[in-house]
Image (cartoon, grey):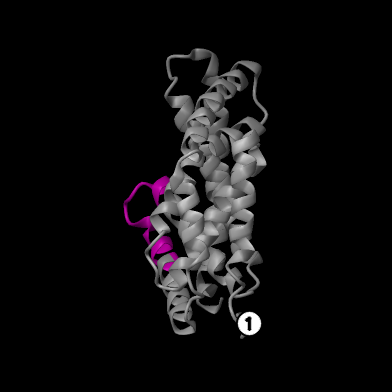
């Protein structure tokens, strides 16, 4: 249920974004990369709650700049043999160099300055946006069986579910059920990213055991995620 109180102030996450940008610039710490992306995602939703398009593309570019590093950090945290771990380490170093270059752009400071000037969303816009977020989640879930690739459809559902969760949390709502489903879908997405990287090295037969293990785990995760979605789907409108 939503609280009747106003949104949390924007600087709740704007200050966090600034802190994590500085940490990424200085150390490229995995947790800082992750928290920078989360902060940017939450602020993007805050802008959408106010029906504002300005700066959302800039936040999306910031998140995408960090995505490759974050994906490799997640994969590196999974247990794997030394050869695959070394491959991931090398890729991480390359992607970190690209991210560091992107973080030195003056556009990052311009983004922070711009966000600090955006007024708080109007209450009417907020409630309209939350209903829109719910409909997007429902439509994404309804498309799981429309013939489109299942992994792509689940990826869309995960992203839209995350934005609904962030929107509700800006309003102070309880979102534990949404968070649980998002974690199911997030785990599946992590495996899909690893599977794609492994398939790109299909000629490396030393990785065949890893490929089979990831495919098997994906099958298990997919069924758990679908079961969790079916259970939650009828109650999306209640949040």
**Residue 155 is one of the magenta-drawn residues:** no
Residue at (49%, 32%) from the top-left corner? 195
Which residue is more in the foreground, 103 or 145? Answer: 103
Magenta stretch encompasses residue 145: yes
Query: What residue is drawn where x is 42% and y is 24%?
Result: 200
Depth check: give the residue in front, 170 or 102. Answer: 102
Residue that label 1 marks: 3
Furthest residue toward left: 147
Image position of 178 with respect to 66: above or below? below
Q: Residue 212: image x %, image y %? A: 53, 27
The answer to whether any part of residue 112 appears in the image is yes
Quarter occupied by residue 221: top right
Q: Is residue 6 above or below residue 166?
A: below
Nearest the camera: 141 or 121?
121
Q: How many marks?
A: 1
Residue 191 position within the rendered picture, expressed as x and y whole percent measured from the top left: 54, 38
Tell me the element at label 1.
loop
Residue 224 seen in render = no
Provide residue 16's location: percent of width, then percent of height: 64, 55
**Majority SS type along the magenta span:** helix
Boundaries of the magenta span: 137-153
The residue depicted at 50 percent of the width and 58 percent of the height is 113
Q: Position of residue 47 (x, y in %)?
A: 46, 67
Task: Locate the C terminus by quadrant.
Answer: bottom right
Taking depth in this image into account, of 31 and 137 the one nearest to the observer is 31
Pick the quarter of the image with the N terminus.
bottom right
């Amino acid at each position: 249920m939503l609280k009747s109180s106003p949104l949390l102030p924007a600087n709740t996450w704007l200050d966090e974004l600034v802190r994590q940008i500085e940490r990424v610039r200085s150390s490229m710490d995995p947790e800082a990369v992750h928290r920078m992306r989360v902060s940017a995602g939450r602020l993007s939703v805050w802008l959408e709650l106010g029906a504002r398009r300005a700066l959302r593309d800039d936040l999306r570019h910031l998140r995408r700049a960090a995505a490759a590093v974050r994906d490799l950090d997640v994969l590196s945290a999974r247990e794997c043999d030394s050869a695959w771990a070394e491959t991931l380490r090398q890729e991480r170093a390359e992607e970190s160099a690209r991210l560091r270059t992107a973080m030195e752009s003056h556009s990052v400071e311009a983004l922070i300055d711009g966000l600090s000037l955006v007024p708080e969303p109007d209450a009417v816009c907020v409630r309209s946006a939350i209903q829109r977020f719910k409909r997007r989640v429902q439509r994404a879930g309804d498309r799981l069986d429309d013939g489109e690739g299942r992994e792509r459809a689940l990826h869309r559902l995960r992203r839209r579910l995350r934005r609904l969760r962030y929107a509700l949390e800006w309003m102070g709502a309880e979102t534990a059920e949404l968070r649980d489903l998002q974690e199911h879908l997030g785990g599946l997405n992590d495996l899909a990213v690893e599977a794609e990287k492994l398939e790109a090295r299909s000629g490396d037969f030393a990785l065949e055991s890893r490929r089979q293990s990831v495919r098997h785990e994906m099958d298990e995760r997919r069924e758990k995620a679908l079961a969790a979605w079916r259970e939650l789907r009828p109650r999306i409108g209640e949040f």
